[in-house]
Image (tube, grey):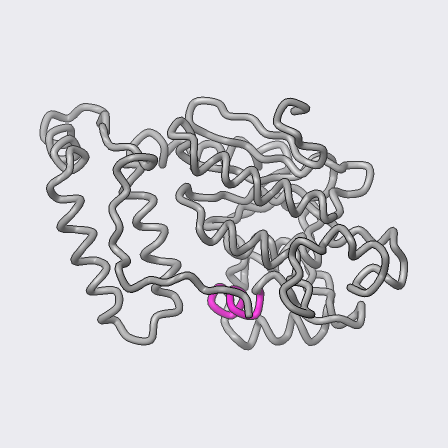
Amino acid sequence: MAALGFETLLYAVEDGIATITLNRPDKLNAFTARMMKELIGVFDLTDADDAVRVVIVTGAGRAFCAGADLSGGGATFDRTSPQAIEREEGKVGDVYRDGGGRVVLRMYESLKPIIAAVNGAAVGVGVTMQLPMDIRLASTDAKFGFVFARRGITPEACSSWFLPRLVGMQTALEWCFTGRVFGAQEALERGLVRSLHAPQDLLPAARALAREIADNTAPVSVALSRQLLWRMAGADHPMEAHKADSRAIQSRGAAGDAKEGVSSFLEKRAPAYPDKVSTDLPDIWPEWGEHPFR
């Protein structure tokens, strides 16, 4: 871990599955500026490593992430306070970019699928950072809370974009208006999480799902599928999807992965896809531009 420069995370890759563990258990994995930078950096690692097929994110100890570290007291969220110096690099003009937003925007761009294994309390940024993750599994002990209005602030980490798309506007508004903490069963019933598991079964279930992806699918196809689904969530017309789909199918249909996918199916054997995300990912987005912070 020291060689990678991580102080707030643990990172391991085994058999195609990268596991990122938020690792401040004595602070319930509370979010800091350092954790922000390390989360952005670790997704640079997973994208660059063709050995990584799927990413799992979980927490050490009894919490997933208890939200922002409040050790700064009442000035925690004041960007004019001395502790804001750590965030100077994210300042644009006279605005300090939200740290949680910087993390989730990096997750949004991920080329690998992200599975959340929510092992315990997940409130504030501890839940909003999960929203751009693709599939969320939770322990029956997990609790969630969009507590911002109870701290005198507002939802962050681009959650006003992600949350209504996941659970619907009415639920998103209720959770943000009340700021109440709710249990895993409500999270399941409202669509925030995919499934609940006994605490000891949570990581095995996440790994089994990751294994299904890693063992059976073409990594370039998964990367493109992730881009298509997330980017089209905000498209203004299905024609935008049709344009991207057409380019993707044309490129993928001529690639070695498509030949292998069909051949392995007909021959009833496990596939061995030749294409790599690092070298063979086509650009199906000629009209897709950067979205700078202004």
Q: Quadrant of the N terminus?
A: top right
Residue drawn at 78 percent across, 54 percent down:
85
Residue 190 percent location from the top left of the image: 54, 64
Predominant secondary structure, magenta span:
helix
Residue drawn at 40 percent across, 26 percent down:
51
Q: Quadrant of the C terminus?
A: bottom right
Residue drawn at 71 percent across, 36 percent down:
8
- Of residue 42 and residue 177, the one placed in the foreground of this image is 42
| Residue 78, placed above or below residue 58 | below
| Residue 216, placed above or below residue 181 | above
- Of residue 178 and residue 8, the one placed in the foreground of this image is 8
Q: Quadrant of residue 64?
A: top right
Q: How many numbered circles does the render carry? A: 0
| Residue 131, placed above or below residue 49 | below
- Of residue 251 and residue 137, the one placed in the foreground of this image is 251
Q: In this view, does 218 lie to the left or right of 135?
A: left
Residue 54 percent location from the top left of the image: 43, 36
Residue 17 percent location from the top left of the image: 46, 30
- Of residue 109 and residue 95, the one placed in the foreground of this image is 95
Is 160 magenta? The answer is yes
Q: Hey, which residue is sitting farthest front in the picture? A: 93
Q: In which quarter of the image is residue 216?
A: top left
Residue drawn at 68 percent across, 43 percent down:
35
Residue 49 percent location from the top left of the image: 42, 30
Q: What stretch is highlighted in magenta?
A: 159-166
